[in-house]
Image: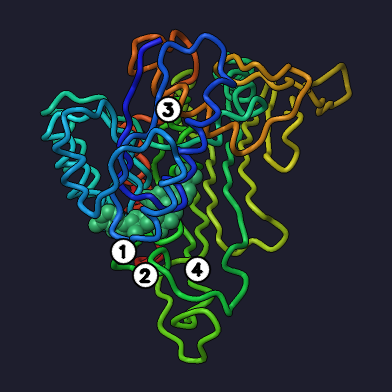
Amino acid sequence: MSDVRIGIIGGGLMGRELAAVCGRWLHLVDHPVRPSVVAVADLDPAAREWFRQVPTVETLTDSWRDLVDDDSLDVLYIAVPHNLHEEIYTAAARAGRDFLAEKPFGIDLGASERIAAAIDEAGVFVRVSSEMPFFPGALRAYEYARSGALGELIEVRSHFLHSSDIDRSKPINWKRRVETCGDIGVMGDLGMHVAHVPLRLGYQPSAVYALLDDIVTERPISAGATETTRCETWDNALITMRGTSPDHPQRAFPMLWETKRIAPGNMNTWSFEAVGMDAGVRFSTRTPAYFERFRRDGSEQVWEQVQPGNVSAWPMVSGAIFEFGFADALLQMWASFLAERAGALGDRFATATVAEAVGSHRVFAAASRSSAEGKAVS
Ligand SMILES: NC(=O)c1ccc[n+]([C@@H]2O[C@H](COP(=O)([O-])OP(=O)(O)OC[C@H]3O[C@@H](n4cnc5c(N)ncnc54)[C@H](O)[C@@H]3O)[C@@H](O)[C@H]2O)c1
């Protein structure tokens, strides 16, 4: 086991999640590295203060450049608002730092391409955060689709639906402003999550037609305030497109990517479904204990439930009969990222790549154009 010293740039919601992940690393069996969070950069003193309880932390600073320039760090985790991705990711790459980037990997397609070019030039190891496919049922659904068992594809759907914006009195924040979240709105927030598995399966998107909705157009400027300000980002995005799979490149099938901040009845539902002429598969985090497979049995059509148990990409001390959740998915994503960096991932599922992040941005850019022009965009 080798030690990996991690510096976090952006100690907000996701930065704290990483500190918690490192604190329970013993859950993993025979992992090649042992990570610890040793430095945190955040502009907000309260955000920095939270990390005082993390025993491994040596440095708290308000300057992200301190961490980019710190040769004692092995890996950075950069989890800041989207308008800062390009500047900080490219600076980290040019300084020769390996890092886990947060989605959407740049505020727009152009930013994502410039970041990718800087990473290519520097030759650093970078992956992009997307943890939901590490649910055991999601992994099994992915593997079943990858096996070729589905035959010629009829339809593919992936969704990420929540309702964190259903409350009109929720105040504005950076994720609801174009300047900081990006013109792509909810697609930037949730889109990488729905793109990861289809792109990993090699499904090539084309002919994008999107319905984008800005439902809540005003929000209070702060908690309890009566004064409101424009809430300008897309709340919901329904992106339809054609996809082709490497197994049947001549046959284009409908592919649907749905990202919603206002989906009544959904707390945080991620799902993937692929149905072909020979079989089908689907998984949803609403029913995390099982995934479903479709087959024909004579004249009968059967959707069967399969319980994969608590078996994700990296072995864990928790037994296979126990249940898996969001925090486990994050642990598994970090296990995958750090094992791949150490050259020890083998054939286990890997974290989203830079190419997949740029590919997802191509779809979001096409979706934005489609919505503006009211037609499909290649
Ligand atoms: N993978 C996931 O499931 C997931 C979930 C939520 C957010 N995210 C992504 O993580 C990133 C951060 O989102 P979050 O929800 O943690 O946001 P957040 O607002 O909770 O945290 C962002 C932090 O960045 C800090 N910050 C802002 N400007 C800074 C600067 N110049 N230098 C240093 N720190 C600065 C803020 O003070 C804040 O503490 C985004 O890219 C977001 O899309 C990913």
Question: Alpha carbon of mark 1 to alpha carbon of mark 2: how far?
Answer: 6 Å
| Image quarter hosting the N terminus | top left
Mark 4 in CB contact with mark 3 (< 8 angstroms): no
Marks 1 and 4, how far apart at CA: 19 Å
For label 1, the crowd category at 10 Å Cα-Cα, with few meaning under 14, some 14 to 19 and many 20 or more, is: some
Nearest to N terminus: mark 4 or mark 2:
2
Counting residues from the N terminus, which is met first, the one under dot 3 or under dot 1? 1
As displayed, is residue 186 above or below residue 179? above
8 relative to 279 in the view: left or right: left
- Closer to the observer: label 4 or label 3? 3
Given the image, on which type of amino acid does mark 4 rest?
Asp
Q: 353 and 367: which one is in front?
A: 353
Q: Amino acid at mark 3?
A: Thr
Mark 1 residue element? helix
Q: Which of the labelled discs sits on residue 9, or is there none? A: none
Residue topped by disc 3: 351
Q: Is residue 188 visible?
A: no
Q: Residue at x 61, y 36 (%)?
A: 272
Q: Which mark is residue 177?
A: 2
**Which residue, given by chain and number where applicable, does mark 4 sit on?**
213
